Amino acid sequence: MKKPATIAGALVAQILTNLNSDQMHLGLPGIPLHDPCVIAYLLDPSHFIGRYVNVVVETRGEYTLGATVVDWHGNTGRAPNARWITEINCELFFAHLAQALSRLP
């Protein structure tokens, strides 16, 4: 990876490096980047793969209170209400992130 040319880029690179080290220590493959992915999706959803499913938040369960429940197979008969993203074009995402950071001081 090329060294960031801006202060903002260097800070973000350091944050991501530190977070990734923490995740690897826990045996996880990488770090979730929820907020930047939302913005990337809004700018160009074609770089994401997912499917439309019914998603609800369980509010009455004794053991699942607050859990996000995804009906992958249509078992509930409820209409899909969300696009659940399962994949992203990582190379393109990071290229766009680097481009955006290059415009900051």
Image (cartoon, rainbow, N blue to C red):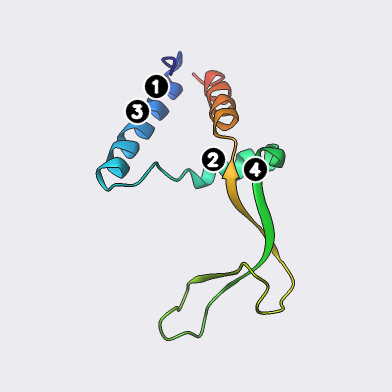
Which residue has dot 2 on it? 36
Q: Secondary structure at mark 4?
A: strand
Q: Nearer the viewer, mark 3 or mark 4?
A: 4
Give me the C-alpha separation between circle 3 and circle 4.
26 Å
Q: Secondary structure at mark 1?
A: helix
Q: Are marks 1 and 3 in contact (CB under 8 Å)?
A: yes
- Amino acid type of the residue that numbered disc 3 sits on in the rendered structure: Gln
Q: CA distance from mark 1 to mark 3?
A: 6 Å
Q: Earlier in the sequence, mark 2 or mark 1?
A: 1
Say above or below: 75 vs 42. Answer: below
**Helix, strand or loop at mark 2:** helix
User: Which amino acid type corresponds to the residue marked 1 in the rendered image?
Assistant: Ala
Q: Mark 2 touching mark 3, by CB under 8 A?
A: no
Q: Find the distance from the CA under tag 2 to the CA under tag 3.
A: 16 Å
Q: Position of residue 20 (x, y in %)?
A: 34, 37
The residue labelled by disc 4 is 48
